Amino acid sequence: MSTTPQAAKLFGNAIGEKGNYLNASRGIKSWLLTLDHKRIGIMYLIGVTVALLLAGVFALVLRSELFTGTKMFLTEAQYNQMFTLHGAIMVFAFIIPSVPAALGNFVLPMMLGAKDVAFPRLNLCSFYLWLFGTGFLLVAMLTNGLDTGWTFYTPYSIKTTSAVMYATMGAFILGFSSIFTGLNFLVTINTMRPPTMTWFKMPLFLWSLYATSIIQILATPVLGITLLLLFAERALHIGIFDPAYGGDPVLFQHFFWFYSHPAVYIMILPAMGIISELMSVHAHKKIFGYAFIAFSSVAIALLGFLVWGHHLFASGQSTLLSLIFSAITFSVAIPSAVKVFNWLATLYKGSISLVTPMCYALSFIFLFGIGGLTGLFLGTLSVDIHLHDTYFVVAHFHFVMVGGTLTALLGGLFHWWPKMFGRMYNDFMGRVSCFLVFAGFNLTFFPQFVMGARGMPRRYARYDPEFQIFHQVSTIGAFVLGIGVVVAFAVLVYAIYRGPKVGGNPWGAASLEWQSSSPPDYHNFTHKVVMNDPYDYSVMVYDEDLDTYIHREFTVPEKPARTEPEPTTT
C-alpha cells in the first residue's frame, strides 16, 4: 500500500527523531520545569509507582506479621503505625492520583487532538503539590509515625501523640493537587475539543475523567476543611470533634465520608474509562451502548455524593436515615452494572485479541464484579451490623479499589506504553504478570471474606488460632501479587531499552491519540488530525510498508494498471 509523505511522517516510528517529546530537550532541569503534559504525566507515573511500591512493602510486612497469631517482629503499636501508613500512602498518594494524574495527563489532550491541557503551569503546579503532600506523609512516617488509621478518626486522632499534624497537612496539600487537576481537565474538555467532536463523539475515557473532575472539585474541599478543623482541634481545643469540649467525634466521620465516598469514584471512574477503551479496541468492535456508558459515569459521580451514611450504620444514626442511605447505596450499583453489561455485550461476536491489555481488562471485570456484589451485603442494614469492622470490609474495599484501579492502571499502561515510548514490550511476559496479579490478588483477599463472615475483626495484630490458615493463605497470596506487580513494571521498563520499535498505531485503534507518531511529537501532532467516531474501526487500514494501522484518509489509492487496447482485425 502506498501512502502520502505526510502519512509516513505521522505514522512512522519516531523513537529516534529529535522532534519527539522524549528528546525535545535534555537534562533533569528540562523535565522539572517542563510544561509538556506528556512529561508531567510521566513524572506523575514515576511518583505514583514509587508510592505503590512503598505502600506495597508495608502491606507485605503486615501480612508477614499476621502469618502466625503471635508476635513475630512488630509490636501492637508498630502494627498500628504500619497499616495506617500503608493505607494513607496507598489511598492519598497512589490510588487517587494514579489514573487521572498519570495516564489522564498523558492521554487526555491527545484524545482531543490538542497540543496541551488548558493550563499547563497549573498542571505542573499540581504535580509539585503532589510531591510536597507525599513528602509530609513520609515525614510523618519518619518522625513519630502515624497510628490513627488512614481515616484519621476522632477522638483518637485528637489524643494520640503520633505525627497527625504532618499527615493531615500532607493530605490537605494532596487535596489541592487533586482540585487543580480536576479543574484543568474540566476546562480542557469543555474548551479544547475539535469543532466536530461533540459530547457524544468523545472517547469514553474522557467522559470518565470529566465525571471524576466534577467529584474532585466539589468533594475535595470538604476534606480540606475537615482536616483543617482537625488540625485546629489538636492545636487549640476549640470543641468541634472533642467531646471533652462539647464536640461530636461522629461529626468528623460524616465530614470525612462525605468526601471519601465520592473519592472512591475518583479512584474507580477513570479505571472504568480505561476498560471501555480496552474492551472496544482489543475486541475490534464498536462499543456497545455508548450513551448508556457515558451517562452512567455522570450518574455514578452524582449518586456518590448521597451514600456516605452507609459507613455509619453502626454509629447510632436514626434507623430511617440508615434505611435511606441503604436504598441509595443499592441504586449506585445500577450505573456500575450498566457498564459491566455493556462491556460484555461489546465482547459478543467481537474479534478478541488476548493481548496483555485485554487480559487485564478481563481481570478487572471479574474482580470489580466481586467487589460490587459484596458491597450489596455491606449496604444491607442487618448484614452490615454483623460484618461491620471485620475482614469482610477489608476484602470488599480491596476488590473494588486495588482489584479495580490497579488492574485497570496496568491494563492502561500496557495499552498506551507503545504510544508513550515507541517500543513494544514482551507480550508473553505481560500476560504472565497479569496471571500472577490475578491469582495473587484472589489468593490474598478471598480468604478474608471467609474470615470476616466468621467474625475476624480488622486492624488486629493478634487473632485466634481458628483464623491462622486463612491468614497464611492470604500472606502467600500477597507475595504472589507483589511479584506480579514487580514483573509488570519490569516488563514495561525493559521495553523502553530493548523492545522493538513500533509505528504510530499498533492496535488499530480509531481515537485521535493514535494519529500521532510513537512516541508523540513534542507538539503532539504535526498535521491536522482526521476526526471520526473513536470506535469506528472501519476507517483504519493496515499499511504493510509502515507496519502499522493508519487512517484510510491518509492512503493514496493506487492507479489502475494501464491496459493497451486490443488490435482490431479486418
Image (cartoon, helix red, strand yellow):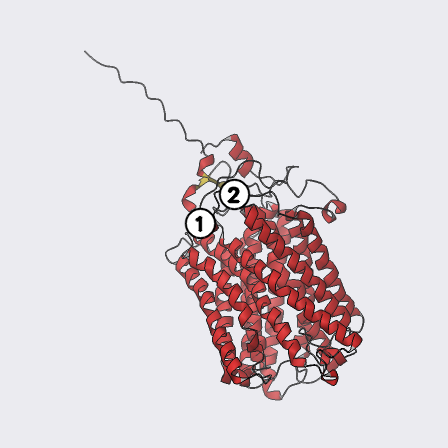
The quarter of the displayed image where residue 482 is located: bottom right
User: Spatial distance from mark 2 to mark 1, Cα to Cα?
Assistant: 17 Å
| Whether residue 391 is situated above or below residue 206 in the rendered picture | below
Q: Does label 2 or label 1 sit earlier along the sequence? A: 2
Residue at far left of view:
570
Q: Amino acid at mark 2?
A: Pro
Residue drawn at x 64%, y 77% is 253
Residue bearing mark 2: 194
Q: Amino acid at mark 1?
A: Tyr
Taking the spot 54% from the left edge, 66% from the top edge, the residue there is 438
| Coordinates of residue 523 in the picture (x, y in percent) | 62, 40
Mark 2–mark 1 contact, CB under 8 Å? no
Q: Indicate the secondary structure of the residue bearing disc 2.
A: loop
Task: Give the vertical position of 137 relative to 76 (above or below).
Answer: above
In the image, what residue occupies the spot 45% across and 36% down?
553
Quadrant location of the C terminus in the rendered image: top left
Q: Nearer the viewer, mark 2 or mark 1?
A: 2
- Eyeballing the image, is 301 above or below 555? below
Q: Is residue 335 above or below residue 101?
A: below
Determine the secondary structure under disc 1: loop
Q: Position of residue 494 (x, y in %)?
A: 64, 52
Circle 1 residues within 10 Å: few <14, some 14–19, many ≥20: many
Image quarter (top left, top right, bottom left or bottom right) of the N terminus = top left
Q: Which mark is drawn over residue 380?
A: none
Residue furthest right as drawn: 143
Q: Is residue 202 left or right of residue 463?
A: left
Q: Tell me where residue 104 appears, x and y as whole percent.
A: 59, 54
Residue 232 placement (x, y as % from top left): 76, 73
Task: Classify residue 297 as left or right of residue 567.
Answer: right
Q: Which mark is residue 535?
A: 1
Q: Could you tell whether 177 is left or right of 505 in the image?
A: right
